[in-house]
Structure formats: C-alpha cells, structure tokens
Amino acid sequence: MYFQRAEDSVSTTATVRADPRAILRSGLPDRYLTPDDIAEIFEVPKETVYQWRKKRIGPPGFRIGKYIRYDPADVLAHVAERKTTDQDAA
C-alpha cells in the first residue's frame, strides 16, 4: 500500500492512496474507512478493531456486502464522546 503526504497531494501524476491520517475532515480521509484504517489511526492491531465491533465499544461501523466500513464523521463523534466520558470520570 502506498501513501502520499498532504504536500504531495497537489501533484497530478500521483496515483497513490492518501494516508488515513491525512488532513481532511479534521484529520481523517474524505472516504469511508476500512478496519485497517481504523487500526492504523488508533495504533492498535486490526483484531482489536474487530473485538471493539463485536463488543460494541468502538466506533460504529456498517456493512457494504461482506466488507465493514466506518464513516469518518462517526469516528470523530465516537472519539469526542470517549473524551467527554473520560474527562467526566476523572
């Protein structure tokens, strides 16, 4: 898998995938995220992402056929909710 840096995105000859942490939509790419993207963003193993989904404790995902995808807006909302919960508990 190839990645491009934000400053390389203006190149019209670049045919590589953007880094999941690119500066779009407040740090997330402007596309639906895969479990691999979620694992990379949160720096956890992909199996952890699947366990979060199974236990319903991670960002909400949805199925497209046999594939799981995550809406970047839902991921941001989940992070904001977790931050608020953790601050209230402290």
Image (cartoon, rainbow, N blue to C red):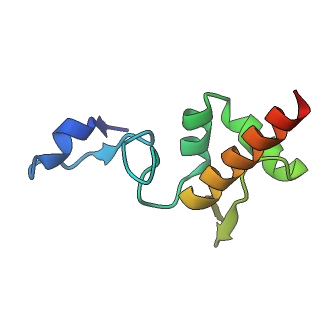
Residue 7 x/y as whole percent:
19, 37
Question: Vertical placement of 73 versus 38: above or below?
Answer: below
Question: Vertical placement of 33 versus 6: above or below?
Answer: below
Q: Quadrant of residue 27?
A: top left
Q: Residue at x 13, y 48 (%)?
A: 10
Q: Quadrant of residue 25?
A: bottom left
Q: Is residue 45 left or right of residue 72?
A: right
Q: Is residue 68 left or right of residue 17?
A: right
Residue 62 x/y as whole percent:
69, 66
Asked if residue 80 can be seen in this view, the reply is yes
Residue 42 x/y as whole percent:
62, 33
The N terminus sits in image quarter: top left
- Decide which of 68, 7 is in the foreground and name it: 7
- Decide which of 33, 80 is in the foreground and name it: 80
Question: Vertical placement of 62 versus 41: above or below?
Answer: below
The C terminus sits in image quarter: top right
Q: How many marks?
A: 0
Q: Is residue 44 left or right of residue 53?
A: left
Q: Residue at x 67, y 29 (%)?
A: 44
Q: Residue at x 9, y 52 (%)?
A: 12
Question: Vertical placement of 68 versus 64: above or below?
Answer: above
Asked if residue 71 can be seen in this view, the reply is no
Q: Quadrant of residue 46?
A: top right
Q: Is residue 31 left or right of residue 80?
A: left
